[in-house]
Amino acid sequence: MDKDNIIMSVENLIIRFKLREDILTAIRGLSLDIYRGESLAIVGESGSGKSVLTKSFLGLLDNNGWIESGNILYGEHNLVEFKDERQWHKIRGKEIAMVFQEPMTALNPLKTIGKQIRESIELHQGITGDDAKNETIRVLEDVGISNAKYRYNQYPHEFSGGMRQRVVIAIAVACRPKILICDEPTTALDVTVQAQILQLLRELKYKYNLTTIYITHDLGVVANVADRIAVMYAGDIIEIGKSEEIFYNPKHPYTWALLSSLPQLGKRGEPLYSIEGTPPNLFHEIKGDAFAPRNPKALKIDFVERPPYFQVSPTHKAKTWLLDPRAPKLQPPKSIRYIGRLDRGDIDGE
Ligand SMILES: Nc1ncnc2c1ncn2[C@@H]1O[C@H](COP(=O)(O)OP(=O)(O)OP(=O)(O)O)[C@@H](O)[C@H]1O
Ligand SMILES: [Mg+2]
């Protein structure tokens, strides 16, 4: 993880929203370095701030939201200082592109998909006519749509959910962005399709020299495809590391809980582990470790002081007091201790 290889640096970001007379803090002092060419997964339950965080990279926060403080450094820009749409136009789509959660709303139902991709190519690559059409077909093939010449003339409703997602990705990569953010459809796609889309992103990463960010609730989906995983809870990244570090050596009790609830670990005939309680109310100031009220083994200090990052390896860190040298040595729950071995097939998950 080379400092020179950072493509974007988020520093101490705080994002708030105003709802009637109340103020909610959606992102609570979050920092994140993103490396050129990596595929990063951001994982966390609904409301943890995944979309708000990534929308702020594109100046797309809802009107009642604002960046209270912090920096988003990209090239020579600090995106937090952008004031008007003209500045964002240079970044949005061209440098950083986002594929949204609902592919159907991202596509125009009245235009053929060929036309929609082609418009994006004409606008961003400055080519027209047959060249633009051929390039469109090439991009369609790149995103894994077979029979692209024929598909070119079809309308969005003639595509399945997964195929539509590919079309939306095609429109995004046609602008040749450096960073591609993909906000997973929450309901529309099944797990197999999700995995295929992730695999596609991985291929495109090489073909188009992309840095990719994949947003999901489902840790299971990203296991084999993400280089790094950032685990979000209540507006902050509470643990981040290489994919194998998060799976085989997780440190934060919330990451433990997420791993424990993976269906792959469930024993047949037993109910799946689920995380008790609800996420904290973001309208109030959160004291200590935000996960403490849901953590049956929380320490006293967890309710008092917010933990800093403790470094686990040069590439792995977590915000939990359990990593303080003075903390009691607590083992992760039994169910997840064997993930590494299960994966390698050493034991058969009795
Ligand atoms: N326009 C808004 N006004 C008020 N609160 C908002 C607004 N947009 C987002 N929030 C709040 O910010 C928090 C983070 O929301 P966000 O949409 O980023 O969550 P998420 O992790 O993307 O969830 P999901 O997995 O459901 O998409 C939530 O508490 C949400 O209610
Ligand atoms: Mg979201």
Image (tube, helix red, strand yellow):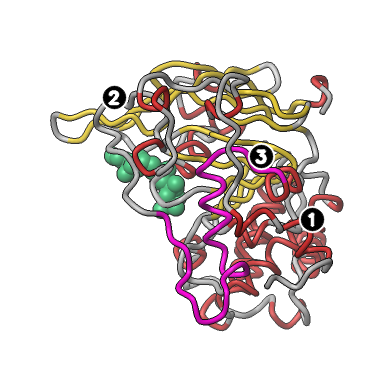
Q: CA distance from mark 3 to mark 1?
A: 16 Å
Disc 1 secondary structure class? helix
Disc 3 secondary structure class? loop
Disc 2 secondary structure class? loop
Q: Nearer the viewer, residue 208 or 319?
A: 319
Q: Which residue is mark 1?
A: 204
Location of residue 234 with respect to 345 vertically, above or below: above
Residue 309: % across, % down: 59, 23
Which label is found at residue 245?
Answer: none
Categorize mark 3 by other alpha carbons within 10 Å: few (<14), some (14-19), many (20+). Answer: some
Residue occupying the point 27% across, 38% down: 281
Residue occupying the point 54% across, 29% down: 320
Q: Looking at the image, do the residues carrying marks 3 and 1 touch, with CB atoms under 8 Å apart?
A: no
First in residue order: circle 2 vs circle 1:
1
Question: In the image, which residues are magenta?
Answer: 249-275
Q: Which residue is mark 2?
A: 285
Q: Looking at the image, do the residues carrying marks 3 and 2 touch, with CB atoms under 8 Å apart?
A: no
The amino acid type found where label 1 is placed reads Leu
Which label is found at residue 94?
Answer: 3
Q: Nearer the viewer, residue 273 or 333?
A: 333
Residue 263 falls within the magenta-colored stretch: yes
Residue 45: % across, % down: 45, 51
Q: What is the quadrant of residue 311 in the picture?
A: top right
Q: CA distance from mark 2 to mark 1?
A: 41 Å
- Rendered-image quarter of ligand 1: top left
- Foreground tag (2 vs 1): 2
First in residue order: circle 3 vs circle 1:
3
